[in-house]
Amino acid sequence: GTAPMIAPSILSADFANLAAEAAAVARPGETRADWLHVDVMDAHFVPNLTLGLPIVESLLKATDIPLDCHLMIENPERWAPPYAEAGAHNVTFHAEATENPIGVARDIRTAGAKAGLSIKPGTALEPYLEILRDFDTLLIMSVEPGFGGQKFIPEVLEKARAIRKFIDSEDLRLLVEIDGGINADTIEEAAEAGIDCFVAGSAVYGADDPGQAVAALRESAAT
Ligand code: DX5
Ligand code: ZN
């Protein structure tokens, strides 16, 4: 397949130094991240509160790494398209947060970004299989959304294996991303299950050298 992609999550970075934290994984070469993962939380869909559109707009000016915006928010109908209009590369929202995922995906694409659908660890994949043509990425959560530094839930890899089969049989163009508890100990089994893109927060920004952590994770996922 394609080379594994690494998306460091700035949730585990220093929020007072976001430009420098982005730059740490933006230097050309093997230490460069593919995407920068930005966790937007509204204290309603999840119990935590992080950042919103103004900070994403500032980050877009501060880095050339494509921003992978993961919206853990209610009412994505209203709040997701502005992230696409601002210039985010991916805008991912949660299946559990809307009755109209296709409509939200189309609005994101119309605004010029890739559309992503995310499902929590306890959410089944089957009801969404038929709408995945309207999406560019599927984000499988491997922890309960809300906080960094949690333990990987290996049972979600069943969904990764199932979607990989479905993509192959239906000839879908869909990137499969995993988010939560990805580190040197868990990335290999996730890669074996068919994941394309690995989000890693504490494993990258908790490391002494975030760029080296990106390179090491990519290497582990490739073997
Ligand atoms: C959790 C967030 C994740 C989080 C991952 O709700 O969606 O992106 O930052 O952090 P780690 O890699 O530390 O589990
Ligand atoms: Zn995330």
Image (tube, rainbow, N blue to C red):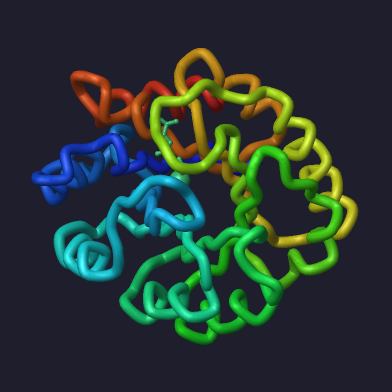
Q: Is residue 38 above or below residue 106?
A: above
Q: Quadrant of residue 138 in the image?
A: bottom right
Q: Residue 188: x, y in percent?
A: 59, 20
Q: Could you tell me which residue is drawn at 85 percent across and 44 percent down?
A: 165
Q: Quadrant of residue 193 in the image?
A: top right
**Is 119 on the left or on the right of 115, as rendered?**
right
Task: State the quadrant of the C terminus.
Answer: top right
Q: Quadrant of residue 10 in the image?
A: top left
Q: Is residue 212 above or below residue 118?
A: above
Instruction: Name the residue at the right extreme.
Output: 169
Q: Nearer the viewer, residue 3 or 187?
A: 187
**Is 211 on the left or on the right of 42, as rendered?**
left
Q: Residue 76: x, y in percent?
A: 52, 72
| Residue 171 appears anywhere in the view | no
Q: Could you tell me which residue is drawn at 38 percent across and 73 percent down?
A: 83
Instruction: Name the residue at the top extreme.
Output: 185
Q: Quarter for ligand 1?
A: top left
Task: State the quadrant of the N terminus.
Answer: top right
Q: Could you tell me which residue is drawn at 79 percent across and 47 percent down?
A: 124
| Residue 144 appears anywhere in the view | yes
Q: Residue 41: x, y in percent?
A: 39, 54
